[in-house]
Image (cartoon, rainbow, N blue to C red):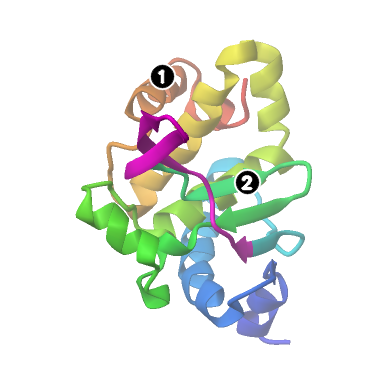
């Protein structure tokens, strides 16, 4: 087995749109693997994940009418989710220009930021590594209700380094960065 075959044998199970997901997964997983291998001392394994494209939550501005609430325009969007219990990643179709999602056009029309699909995929892959390294559990034990700030902050901080800076999770990234400066990036990523 050559290096390329070895790399692809470790790919997640792509439940739908496998060619599209592989197109995004391969360059993202390569960059994350190289970075995290240097940070934590071993190459992350993604072959036990399941990945699918699925419509995720959209937050709408709505008007109350006698018949209930009428959605008027979108104001926010969940683009990706990592489920640590099921070990799966869900990505919203609006991330992918190739799918020509009507929601993507609506989000753009109303100025809702659509992040790069590679970045979102990357953050979710980083969450899977956090789970395998015990970091999510460590954050929960050490920070309680504030754990999500460090979990999301770590993934966004590393994604900024690998895929370019964004305003996503700005406050969480700042908290994680301060923690990394105090105790070191490796320990901070581990949830210490």
Is residue 174 something one can see in this rendering?
yes
In this view, 145 is above or below 66: above
Which residue extends farthest bottom? Answer: 1
Q: Position of residue 126 (x, y in %)?
A: 56, 46
* Left or right side of 6 for 118: left
Q: Which span is picked out in magenta?
A: 52-74
* Left or right side of 134 for 113: left
Task: Name the residue: 74% across, 50% down.
Answer: 87
Task: Name the residue: 67% across, 86% down.
Answer: 2
Task: Name the residue: 68% across, 19% down.
Answer: 140
Label 2: which secondary element? strand
Indicate which disc residue 130 carries.
none
Indicate which disc residue 175 carries.
1
Q: Does 53 appear in magenta?
A: yes
Label 1: which secondary element? helix
Q: Position of residue 176 (x, y in %)?
A: 44, 24
Q: Position of residue 137 (x, y in %)?
A: 72, 26
In this view, 152 is above or below 8: above
Task: Tell which of 22 and 97 is nearer to you.
Answer: 97
Tell me the chief SS of the magenta region: strand
Q: On the image, numbered disc 2 is attached to which residue?
A: 82
Q: Quadrant of the C terminus?
A: top right
Q: Position of residue 14 (x, y in %)?
A: 67, 71
Q: Nearer the viewer, mark 2 or mark 1?
A: 2
Task: Tell which of 63 and 165 is nearer to you.
Answer: 63
In this view, 183 is above or below 157: above
Task: Name the residue: 55% across, 30% down.
Answer: 151
Q: Which callout, 2 or 1, points at the residue further toward the start of the chain?
A: 2
Is residue 157 something one can see in this rendering?
no
Q: Quadrant of the N terminus?
A: bottom right
**Is disc 1 surrounded by few (<14), some (14 to 19) or many (20+) residues within 10 Å?**
some
């Amino acid at each position: 087995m050559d290096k390329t075959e070895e790399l692809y044998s470790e790919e997640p199970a792509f439940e739908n749109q496998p060619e599209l997901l592989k197109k995004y997964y391969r360059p993202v997983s390569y960059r994350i693997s190289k970075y995290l291998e240097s940070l934590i001392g071993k190459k992350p394994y993604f072959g036990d994940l399941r990945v699918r494209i699925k419509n995720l939550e959209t937050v709408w501005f709505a008007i109350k009418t006698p018949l209930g609430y009428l959605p008027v325009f979108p104001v926010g969007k969940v683009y990706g989710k990592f489920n640590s219990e099921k070990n799966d990643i869900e990505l919203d179709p609006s991330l992918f220009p190739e799918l020509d999602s009507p929601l993507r056009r609506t989000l753009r029309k109303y100025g809702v930021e659509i992040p790069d699909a590679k970045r979102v995929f990357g953050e979710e892959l980083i969450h899977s590594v956090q789970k395998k390294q015990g970091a999510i559990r460590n954050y929960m034990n050490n920070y309680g209700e504030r754990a999500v700030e460090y979990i999301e902050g770590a993934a966004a901080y590393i994604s900024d380094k690998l895929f370019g800076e964004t305003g996503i999770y700005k406050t969480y990234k700042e908290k994680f960065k301060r923690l990394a400066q105090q105790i070191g990036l490796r320990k901070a990523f581990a949830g210490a």
